[in-house]
Image: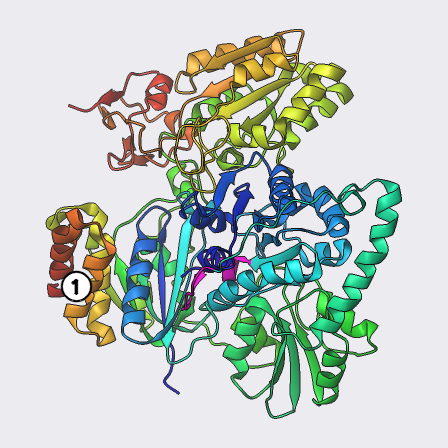
Amino acid sequence: MQKTTNIMIVGVGGQGSLLASKLLGGLLVDEGYDVKVSEVHGMSQRGGSVVTYVRYGERVASPIITEGEADYILSFEKLEAARFAACLKKGGHIIVNTQEIDPMPVLIGKAEYPHDVLAELTAKGVDVDAVDALAVAQAAGSAKCVNIVLLARLSKHLGIPAEKWREAIVKSVKPQFKELNLKAFELGEKL
Amino acid sequence: MIGNEAVARGLYEGGLGFVSSYPGTPSTEITEFLSKYDESELHSEWAPNEKVAMEAAFGASLAGVRATCAMKHVGLNVAADPLFTLSYTGVSGGLVICVADDPAMHSSQNEQDSRHYAVAAKVPMLEPADSAEALAFAKAALDLSEQFDTPVLLRMCTRVAHSQSVVETGERANTEKKPYVKNGEKYIMMPGNAKKRHPVVEKRTEALAAFAENCPFNRVEKGDGEIGIITSGTCYQYVKEMFGDSADVLKIGMPNPLPRDLILNFAASVKKLYVIEELDPVIENHCRALGLDPVGKALFSPIGEYSQATIAKAFGKAVTAGETANSPIPVRPPMMCAGCPHRGMYYTLAKNKVTVLGDIGCYTLGAQPPLSAVDSTLCMGASVSGIHGFNLSDKEAAGRTVAVIGDSTFMHSGITGLVNIAYNGSNSTVIILDNSITGMTGHQQNPTTGFNIKGDPAGKVDLEALCRAVGIRRVRVVDPYDLAACDKAVKEELSAPEPSVIISRRPCVLLKYVKTAPPLSVNTEKCRACKKCLTLGCPAISMKQGRAHIDATLCVGCGVCSQLCAFGAIEKEG
């Protein structure tokens, strides 16, 4: 049986990670995979850490991803990439938006934001693709396209033709934001 | 399709004609998806609370229509009263009660196991393990309800409710409304009739237990006969993830009533028997009552969620975690949004060192630092009921204690507490944080908003008039963006010699119709770095290069921080 691929999408509540998982899940179903996507709603959406699991393969049982299982961690924020790094499989890849969003303990001066976490991970041999996705998204026309920029980086790994990704984007976003998101995808791919 | 959408689809396909619910994570989307169907096919509504919802669904069933209500696990506590007697009356139109448990408490105040309700109320319960089963079980539950003349509980949990997996949809069944027939012996539960109904319930349980031996919801998957695992719901998926097809599995899709022979035969067919179930040992205890000695809670915790890793570790398999960074990772708790109207009132309460009996909603987040303004949170409505007992028992308390409760939660179960304050006379101050929506569960309408579940204009409760009508003479409204007004209101009502209500009113800043102001910025020349603005706990405000800084992408210009700044350093941009 073909092995299951595990993708974790992590970030801060309100950053648009649910759209990313929805788009990715839809694309993978269209590609003929068995797919499971697991989200957590409610309390955690209010500016807290959010995690979404996307698993696909020939037959997927569990909807969640645990320690050492993720092939990819797609992180919308630097600190969140480090928070969930233990879930990465040996040889897995972290794709991370280098944006820093201060959590409450940092905002009120009770903790320091660990600026060097990505370097620390790289030093331990973790493959980290650090992208200023916010800048790329802004160049495409909207800060809200960070999710598409990160998906564009992920698309290089999954072996699904870029055309299919573009179709999935068109399907998932409102018509008036189609061009904007396709542009963000193109810029993300070219990085 | 997420599990909750699949439940909605299954109920729709089963000919559902009525849904009434109160929102609660992780159950909310069941009703939201059902509300998308046309009113001509099925009626949908948000009820003020779960008890009302279940009783409305009972009424629909009594009238001969297939009906449902959906709630979170703690919502079933609220609706437990009708549930236990609905077991006696049975149904006319099929009645399915969806209940969503939240192991690990992603969005809940406890992690109770709702299977106990099925056992205690003597009603059948179905438990799907993924979206495809959620659809199939929901549809079948309506038939089962009519077949056995009983309400049916459909148990979801977070990982089934909020996971997406592939489903196949079907056509909607063509179910006719049954004619209403008066039947007092069945539906009037006074002692004479109820005494006759209880034996009916016991017989039905026996019939359901016999049905459980050979029903489509329970199945055996043969493995190599070494170990046998009895499991249900999302745990089944973790078992399959770990063992594939090697272990023998008895998958329970109907956790109440549990079968006897099916379990005994399964146990006899394997060398070692395990029960893997999240939360309480319901299946395990049943096995023990049958004389079996499975490995269950001796190996698996009754606390929190499981995963494939939980099972791997329990069976002694190595789980290798990935590399981690050396720096400590600060926690990122959820917090009130920038511009949240609750913040101004909480700041006022914290500043005045008021004891705050809190309640359930977004405003529970006022308990987080730096505001740390909440003293207790128990369950929906407990703030208003609790302050009465607190103030009567601590004579000093009345002048320095308030209850805070949201508009939706006040409708849910705050009103009766307020009636008690007025009736039994405690000098209590209740603050209704009215943000014109049910916030935490993702913006559902409620009886105070003036709109129904479909967003159409609807009856609107006048909170001021309601509070006066129950006997509170001092009722006032303040704008929580106005700190001086909040301070005045709190001080005056706390010192008043009679009970009072302060309605702190401003719509949730995330509502689409709310127009926000341009972001504010800090004049670094004027800022003295006193950090007063940081005490608000606004996610837009931090210290940068030794001065306060406002993140323009987050700030909505509410202006609360500028009222705090003694140096006039927080200004409108441009």
Residue A5, visible in the rendered structure: no
Kindly identify the amino acid type of the residue bearing the numbered disc 1: Arg
Q: Residue B164: x percent and y percent? A: 42, 63
- Give the vertical position of B146 relative to B435 (above or below): below
Residue drawn 12% across and 47% down?
A: A141
Residue drawn 51% across and 68% down?
A: B133
Q: Say whether residue B182 is left or right of residue A62.
A: right
Q: Say whether residue B449 is left or right of residue B250.
A: left
Q: Say whether residue A71 is left or right of residue B292.
A: left
- Give the vertical position of B334 relative to B203 (above or below): above
Q: Which residue is mark 1?
A: A166
Q: Residue B206: x percent and y percent? A: 79, 67
Mark 1, Cα crowd under 10 Å, few <14 / some 14-19 / many 20+, is: some
Assess whether residue B217 is covered by the magenta stretch.
no
Residue B294, visible in the rendered structure: yes
What element does badge 1 sit on? helix
| A78 and B116: which is toward the camera | B116
- Segment colored magenta: B157-172
Query: Where the N terminus of chain B falls, by quadrant?
Result: bottom left
- Give the vertical position of B210 relative to B546 (above or below): below
Tell me where residue B222 sits by quadrant. bottom right
